[in-house]
Amino acid sequence: MALIEIDNLVKTYDLGEVKVHALRGVSLRIQEGEFVALIGPSGSGKSTLMNTLGCLDRPTSGSYKLAGDEVAGLNPDQLAQMRTRRIGFVFQSFNLLSRTTALENVEAPLLYNRDCPRHERRARAAGLLAKVGLGERLDHRPNQLSGGQQQRVAIARALVILEISTRGRAARSWRFSAN
Ligand SMILES: Nc1ncnc2c1ncn2[C@@H]1O[C@H](COP(=O)(O)OP(=O)(O)OP(=O)(O)O)[C@@H](O)[C@H]1O
Ligand SMILES: [Mg+2]
């Protein structure tokens, strides 16, 4: 079973008189552990596809199975549950919460995960920040961090979901070199 399986995915933005066909029947499989880059001209639908794969938006039709679960028809609350369990995002512009500390930023994706109690949330977030070389910066807000440090907070925030979702299974190893 592929980790990501999409079949005949269609996304049409309906602007009333005009319909924009952003995805016209996309099918692809991505295996666990595979690294994939999505390339194409401006306006070709990359962000639309990423928003769908990231469970931020739903397709107009077609099938999307994430780790075997059909998610194409989920409502926004169900998609949010899926994101909090399965998906880590590193945004191009980081999107850190400006009035919150590094630690709270990394904890944030787990706030809505009922299976992760507060003490575990704290411990995992602090542990990941230490791994990306920010163990001494837990209480700094984004504007008290360098650009590269902010980027590492964003990476730790994406990895926290991965840690929770592999909890109990033999955690796959990943390495991060701070530069
Ligand atoms: N919310 C929306 N409503 C209507 N049309 C949209 C919407 N979002 C995107 N589109 C249209 O859908 C098409 C695909 O857009 P998308 O943002 O997925 O492209 P992209 O490949 O990410 O482009 P870029 O490389 O410029 O970021 C474009 O023609 C765009 O104008
Ligand atoms: Mg884009």
Image (cartoon, rainbow, N blue to C red):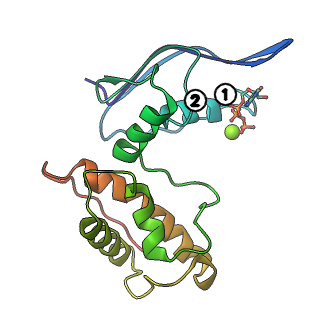
Query: Which residue is under mark 2?
Result: 49
Residue furthest to the right:
17
Compared to residue 35, the image places residue 137 above or below, namely below
Q: Report if residue 100 is visible in the image.
A: yes
Q: Residue at x 42, y 42 (%)?
A: 83
Q: Is mark 1 within 8 Å of ligand 1?
A: yes
Q: Position of residue 131 (x, y in %)?
A: 33, 74
Q: Residue at x 64, y 80 (%)?
A: 143
| Amino acid at the residue labelled 2 | Leu
Left or right for 152, reference 15: left
Query: Which residue is under mark 1?
Result: 45
Label 2–label 1 contact, CB within 8 A? yes
Q: Residues within 10 Å of mark 2 (few under 14, many from 20)?
A: many
Q: Position of residue 101 (x, y in %)?
A: 50, 77
The answer to which of 117 and 140 lies nearer the viewer is 117
Compared to residue 115, the image places residue 53 above or below, namely above
Q: Quadrant of residue 135?
A: bottom left
Compared to residue 34, the image places residue 149 above or below, namely below
Q: Residues within 10 Å of mark 1 (few under 14, many from 20)?
A: some
Q: Residue at x 21, y 52 (%)?
A: 172
The answer to which of 168 and 6 lies nearer the viewer is 168
- As measured in the structure, the alpha-carbon distance from the residue carrying label 2 to the one carrying label 1 is 6 Å
Q: Is mark 2 within 8 Å of ligand 1?
A: yes
| Amino acid at the residue labelled 1 | Gly
Q: Position of residue 14 (x, y in %)?
A: 75, 17
Q: Secondary structure at mark 1?
A: loop
Q: Position of residue 52 (x, y in %)?
A: 54, 30
Number of numbered tags placed on the structure image? 2
